[in-house]
Image (cartoon, grey):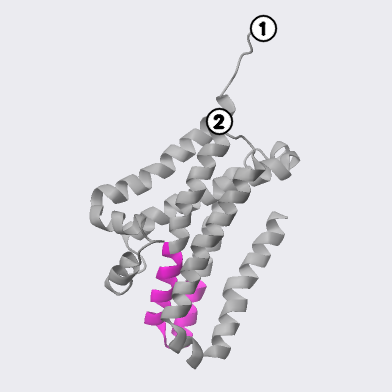
Amino acid sequence: MEPIARTFAQNDWITISLMVSLLFPLTAKSFYYSRFFSFIILPFNNKYITIYTKKEKLFNWFHILLSAFQIINTTLFIYFIWHVYMPQTLVKNPFIFPLLLAGVFLFLTIKTIAQLFNGFIFNSYKTFNELIFKKLTYLNYSGIVLFIANVILTYVAIDSKIVMAIAIIGFLIINIIGWVTVLRNYQNFISSYFFYFILYLCTLEIAPLIILGSFLK
């Protein structure tokens, strides 16, 4: 048998990205220890949601740190999907990851601002602020699933479609739990403004996903 030289140079920037993303939850854990552990058990216990929805503002450092973690890992996961299904694009554009990172950040930022503006329009800013906080909290938690998937796709099961499928299912389950929680907690508010809620759902939830899907396609 002849020895085969293995190089990991192509994974260097991915490793750096994973390490940088990991710094954000570690920082959050260091400065907000009890809050972090309430967040970790979120899918199994809604203590975090109950305590911090009304107590904290949407834009606080703990939330920002975990959002940064989620954005990096969401972008990296999209990159892996892109790498498997559209490898020729990566050859033509080696800077696809930073472009995707900017795109995901702008997408979530613009969407959040639009949702808050919607709250101003309907004189329900506080309610919309709480609603967005809950949704983004579950979205940030799903970043943990994507981080684990990214590590596996980088070092264990490279380009594994099965891992990608499992990660997507886990991502969807966590966010569906978040949506069910929101719908259950705000059912009276939604029933009072049902038409506007459907309009909000189509305009600010479904339409952006269709646009993003078309862009990725």
* Magenta-drawn segment: 113-137
Cα–Cα gap, marks 1 and 2: 24 Å
Closer to the camera in the image, 167 or 96: 167
For disc 2, the marked residue is 11
Q: Is residue 100 visible?
A: no
Q: Could you tell me what secondary structure mostly forms the magenta stretch?
A: helix
Q: Is residue 110 above or below residue 99?
A: below
Q: Residue at x 35, y 57 (%)?
A: 41
Q: Is residue 108 left or right of residue 79?
A: left
Is residue 190 at all visible to an observer of this figure?
yes
Q: Is residue 5 left or right of residue 27?
A: right
Rendered-image quadrant of the C terminus: bottom right
Check the picture and name the quadrant holding the N terminus: top right
Which disc is residue 178 wearing? Answer: none
Query: Which is closer to the viewer, label 1 or label 2?
Result: 1
Which numbered tag is attached to residue 2?
Answer: 1
Please state the horizontal and vertical placement of residue 136, each as a whole percent of the image: 44, 64
Q: Amino acid at mark 2?
A: Asn
The verdict on residue 119 being magenta is yes
Q: Position of residue 15 (x, y in %)?
A: 49, 34
Identified at 67% across, 66% down, the residue is 210
Quarter of the image where one finds residue 34: bottom left
Q: Is residue 205 magenta?
A: no
Q: Earlier in the sequence, mark 1 or mark 2?
A: 1
Q: Residue furthest bottom?
A: 192
Q: Residue furthest front?
A: 44
Q: Residue at x 69, y 41 (%)?
A: 84
| Quadrant housing residue 126 | bottom left
Q: Is residue 64 left or right of residue 143?
A: left
